[in-house]
Amino acid sequence: MLACVLLAGLAVFQVLLAAGRPLGRFAWGGQHDVLPRGLRVGSAVSVVLYALFAVVILQAAGLLAVLPAAVADIGIWVLTGYFALGILLNGISRSRPERFVMTPLVLLLAACCLVTALA
């Protein structure tokens, strides 16, 4: 459930970025306070991906049954790896706000996915 709460928070954040709010220093490398059009589209796509991630996580945790079991079983490991990579990528960001906010957040997401995958 913690992973889904974090993903929901990230989805709200991405909606704000897509809407042109000046929060770009926390995302996409932190190079733009207000994201250019292409990155705004990327933020909108991220919201859809986060919803799909949540479905995989909920099914892997046994709280939902909408996907084939193999998709959830493999998907939770893919998400664990994806978020583990996010730890590295956010950790080396040139943006200090992104490093200090997003790195711990994806660390928590990776840990939640790992615990779910191992359960």
Image (cartoon, helix red, strand yellow):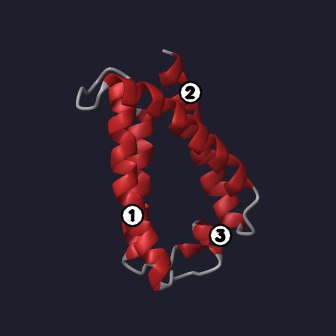
Closer to the N terminus: mark 1 or mark 2?
1
Of residues 28 and 12, the one drawn nearer to the viewer in this rendering: 28
Closer to the N terminus: mark 1 or mark 3?
3
Which residue is under mark 2? 114
* Residue at horizontal 44 percent and vertical 67 percent from the top: 43
* Residue at horizontal 58 percent and vertical 46 percent from the top: 106
**Residue type, numbered disc 2:** Leu
Q: Residues within 10 Å of mark 3 (few under 14, many from 20)?
A: some
* Residue at horizontal 44 percent and vertical 55 percent from the top: 10
**For discs 1 and 3, the disc positioned in front in the rendered view:** 1
Which residue is under mark 3? 29
Give the percent coordinates (x, y) of residue 63. 28, 24
Of residues 102 and 55, the one drawn nearer to the viewer in this rendering: 55
Q: Residues within 10 Å of mark 1 (few under 14, many from 20)?
A: some
Q: Secondary structure at mark 2?
A: helix
Give the percent coordinates (x, y) of residue 77. 53, 30
Image-based side of 40 in relation to 68, left or right: right
Which residue is under mark 1? 45
Q: Secondary structure at mark 1?
A: helix
**Residue type, numbered disc 3:** Gly
Q: Secondary structure at mark 3?
A: helix
